Image (cartoon, helix red, strand yellow):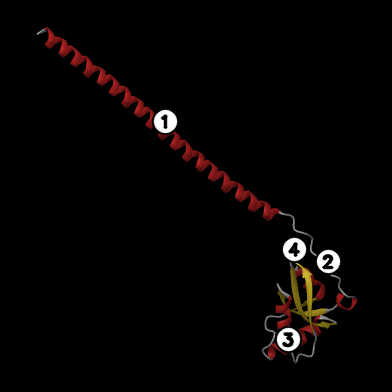
Amino acid sequence: IIAGIIAAVFAMGFLIYMNIVGLQERRTKRNVERKYSQLKVSRQIERARLEKEILKLQDEAKDLKKMAIAPPPASVVIPDQWKDSSTIFLGAFDDKQSAVEKAKGLRGVRHKAHVIGIGSEDGGKKYLLVLGNFKDNSEAVGVLDEFQIQGKLLDADVMPFTEVVKVRQ
């Protein structure tokens, strides 16, 4: 009987010891899992914060580009014979070839077409196509009316040459 009681006490002691060890291991496992979970959430929060900061910096960079001071437009030297004249404005082009092609399409017109390169607000260059060098607005309007009756130059405008240069920059 004594051996049975001793065996039962050892078995109970062993079960209690295993239960205590098992509880400690489960606590340790839960603590590790909780810390891992917290670390994972912290990393996600940090990643989101950094992504938000990157977007903010990109927006600021865009704003700075928009606010960048544009170089002053290139001054256009207007010949004296053009200063007080009117002209027929035919268009502004981003490249010289387009302006020249449109001018070539005006063959048979008795007034000379001029391609004028000027600096644009964005720092690039624009090419203006104008027709003629008229003494006054009424002469230019008469010529334009004649072309428009023929169905040509429908999108053209008559204006003083100095205004063409100012408006189109």
Q: In which quarter of the image is the C terminus?
A: bottom right
- Name the secondary structure under disc 3: helix
Q: Closer to the camera: disc 3 or disc 1?
A: 1
Q: Residue furthest left?
A: 1
The residue beneath circle 4 is 123
**Kind of residue at disc 4:** Gly
The residue beneath circle 3 is 104
Quadrant assignment, res 8: top left
The residue beneath circle 1 is 35
Q: Residue furthest front?
A: 3
The residue beneath circle 2 is 75
- Asked if labels 1 and 3 touch by Cβ distance under 8 angstroms, the answer is no
- Asked if labels 2 and 3 touch by Cβ distance under 8 angstroms, the answer is no
Q: Which residue is painted at 41% across and 33% down in the image? A: 36
2 or 87: nearer the viewer: 2
- Name the secondary structure under disc 4: loop
Q: Closer to the camera: disc 1 or disc 2?
A: 1
